[in-house]
Image: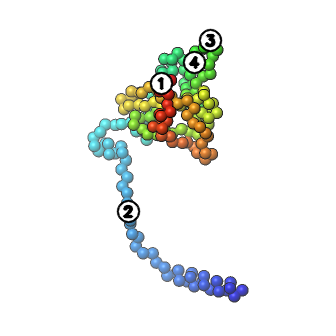
Amino acid sequence: MNDLQARLDARTKELHAMRHVQNGTPVVLGGALVVPAGLLRQLRGEGPTLSAADAAARQRIEQLAMQAVMKAEAAKGHRVVDVSAEKCGWDVSSYPPPVNGVQPDPRHIEVKGRVKGATTITVTRNEILYAVNQGKKFVLAIVFVDPDDTTTAPHYLLNPFQREPDWGAASVNYSIADLLKRAEGNS
């Protein structure tokens, strides 16, 4: 019991001493000034550019990329269907022509349009799950869009993802350079 009383007395003295503690003047060790890139371009007199942060520009880029993929698939003789509004986990279903009277499996293509020079793409958890579950049927198509709205030919990745994302991940960012190393060009 004496031990408990001694500990209580010591703690009480500490608390009484802390009543007289006063904060000193804060010392700033560093600082940062954040200037939006768009503001810098505007101040330099540069024209408007495609910005990944601009929702209208993102939508336009996505639409141009979709058109590029659909045009490339149609040029192969495939029947192409835009299913992006159906939220099924991919954007385009591409049906190849029958071979020896047998209809091959459709290609489920997730289209990622990016401003030329972008370094990453974001893929949703849902898109990755569909890719993993569909195996060879799922194709990731990356299309670059110039500021003048011209597009590159699609870069196709078959089996783009090896595993499901972590449970708590809503989306995953991938390095475009790493993905393009595995791309099959215009297959």
Task: Identify the image quadrant of residue 153.
Answer: top left
Task: Identify the image quadrant of residue 82.
Answer: top right
Q: Mark 1 points at which residue?
A: 186
Residue at image point 38% right, 66% down: 28
Q: Name the residue under label 4.
A: 96
Disc 4 residue crowd, few under 14, some 14–19, many 20+, Cα 10 Å: some
- Comparing labels 1 and 2, the label whose residue is closer to the camera: 1
Direction right: furthest residue: 1
Mark 2 or 4, nearer chain start:
2
Instruction: Determine whether the residue tagged by mark 3 lies in a helix, strand or loop.
Output: loop
The image position of residue 25, as x and y in percent, is 40, 73
Mark 3 or 1, nearer chain start:
3
Instruction: Determine whether the residue tagged by mark 2 lies in a helix, strand or loop.
Output: loop
Instruction: Determine whether the residue tagged by mark 4 lies in a helix, strand or loop.
Output: loop
Tell me the kind of residue under disc 3. Asn
Mark 1 or 2, nearer chain start:
2
Q: Nearer the viewer, residue 102 or 121?
A: 102
Q: Name the residue under label 2.
A: 30
Tell me the kind of residue under disc 2. Gly
Disc 2 residue crowd, few under 14, some 14–19, many 20+, Cα 10 Å: few
Q: Mark 3 points at which residue?
A: 100
Tell me the kind of residue under disc 4. Pro
Direction left: furthest residue: 45
How did the renderer colour the structure? rainbow
